[in-house]
Amino acid sequence: MLFDGTFKHLGRTRQIIKILIKYGFEDLVFHSFLQNLVPRRLLLNWTREDRDVSATTRWERIRMAAEEAGPSAIKIAQLMSNRNDILPEELINELKKMQSEVKTFPFDQAKKILEEELPQPFDEIFEEFDEKPIGSASIGQVYKAKLRTGEEVVVKVRRPGVGKLLVQDLEIAKALLPYAKKVIEENGLTYEAAEDSLLELEKSTIKELDYKNEARNIENFRHFYRKRKDFYVPRAFRQYSTEKVLVIEFAGGCKITDAQQLKEWNIDATKVAERGMDIYLTQIFEFGYFHADPHPGNIIIQEDGRICLIDFGMVGKLMQRDKMSFAQVFVAMAQGDSKKMAWNLRKLCISHEIDNVRMLEYDLQEIIEEYTILDVSESKIEDLILSLQAIMRNYRMRVPGSITLIFRALGLLEGIGKQIHPEFNVPKFVQPYGFKLLKEEYSLENLLNEGLSRASEIGALINSIPVEVRAILKKTRQGKLHVQIEHQGYEPLLRKMDRVVNRFILTFIIFTLVLGSSILATIPMENKFVMESIGLPYISVAGYIFSVFLGTILLFAVLRTRKL
């Protein structure tokens, strides 16, 4: 794994390591095997953003390093800025500053990709094509165009080489993660959460790299909302869309936050905010399939008041069980029931380290008391979410990645809503869905289905017991029954013992060589076997030289660790 992930991409690995050293992360490099890949002469001795880099915080330097590492690192950092549940708030604040606009690539490169990917010649498909991009991001660039059939469209073109670079960086990250376990835990994070986050990141990034996935997402949303007249999803032209190119219907209108334009069109901004929130919550609690990046630029209001959603590169999915638990967290908070809130938070977890449930309930009660006494104008869902995520970190709660996407989305929507609707309150919008899901959960039909499912599981268990017992008895008779015991927490001690034993063996070999060479030096030999200049046999000289060589290696190992 290490070979596949780092040495296969040695050039890129060295580039990343140099950037880490440049921004003062020598501790990550020189306390691991990575020190063998770069020279020690690289030091932190330059300035950035009008400040000496050594004077900046660790979190600022992480952001700077990501920006310099290129579009792939920027994309990874932007995605990780959603993970308040596992990253410190200071780092999240820095990652949010990450440039959303990156350097554009020339139109000649974009046209070359279009000509390679499109099923027909470029001029036969497009009547007009604006060579100046209307947007540029880490994955690709967006252009405005007009088809020969008359439709105005936007064309997304994937950035040249970004797919290969992202895959390389993710492979390197996966290979290096086990070696960063100590650093991760020293910064108050959990290794398991970091591992889950990286796997989730890999899945979402690979999906986002393939524009065919976005085209499928668009079709799914169009299907879900096909009967709704006040909401529209621009269609994708699948016949022109490939892994690297996506052609979508152009959606005219204004941003949802453009209050002046809404007023000119005689559109009630408060109703737009409420309708938008209703649409988003139906995505989560009705379909379990939601847009994961609802920032103002992705929510367009058309002149007739219709809400239009764009950019479906990142979507989240939520299982029925998780929908119930998530909604009930807000219902319990509204009811002031910390016990119920704690229970539903635990149901959301993949795993947790909650040893004292009462303490968790007290912590949640503090959040309830703090949040419910606030006026609507003072309360912020973002503050509530940060408090919940702090509790998740403290109790090592691992939740599905889709939950963190919802948290981020709700924070974005509240920010939008409060700009155009002074009384906008996200929890009050969520609570009716929670009561509706609670009603569904205890409906006769759902209870019957749940009962049948449990009966089926019990039946399967009863049927499997005799087979499993027979297999265990058979292995016992044959002497093939093995019990595996894994000791926890002994790894550091075992590693230290391994180093001590290796040094002892090396010391013993050196001692044996010196002793053997000295004994041979006392034995009379013919002149042809003796080095006349020093009067010692050649074999003794060779033994002394080899023992000095091994002694130098031992001394270097001791000095490098600075421990005897």
Image (spheres, grey):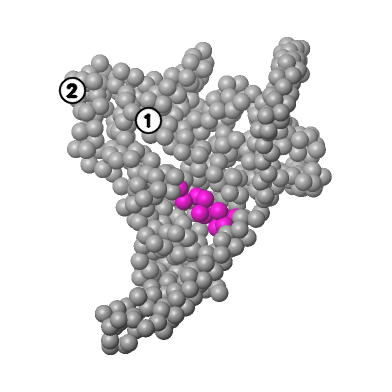
Provide residue 212's location: percent of width, then percent of height: 37, 25
Horizontal side, residue 94 vs residue 17: left or right: right
- Main SS of residues in magenta: helix
For the question of whether residue 80 can be seen, the reply is yes
Q: How many marks?
A: 2
| Residue 184 painted magenta | yes
Per the rendering, the mark at residue 80 is none
Label 1 residue SS: loop
Residue 468 image-quadrant placement? top right
- Name the quadrant of the C terminus: bottom right
Does residue 427 lie above or below 454 as drawn? below
Looking at the picture, tell me which residue is in the foreground, 380 or 312.
Answer: 312
454, above or below 334, in the image? above
**Label 1 with label 2: CB-CB less than 8 Å:** no
| Vertical position of residue 444 compared to residue 234: above or below | above
Give the crowd class for mark 1: few <14, some 14-19, many >=20 residues within 10 Å. Answer: some
Q: Residue 406, percent across and down?
A: 58, 35
Marks 1 and 2 sit apart, C-alpha to C-alpha, by: 22 Å
Which residue is under mark 2? 121
Disc nearest the viewer among 1 and 2: 1
Instruction: Give the magenta-colored segment's residue range.
Output: 175-185
Residue 98 shown left or right of residue 408 in the figure: left
Near-viewer residue (346 or 482): 482
Residue that appears at 76% across and 35% down = 343
Q: Earlier in the sequence, mark 1 or mark 2?
A: 2
Q: Is residue 520 magenta?
A: no
Q: Amino acid at mark 1?
A: Asp
Tell me which residue sits at (50%, 45%) in the image. 80
Badge 1 is on which residue?
210
Residue 135, percent from left and from top:
34, 38
Amino acid on which disc 2 is placed: Pro
Q: Nearer the viewer, residue 347 or 177?
A: 177
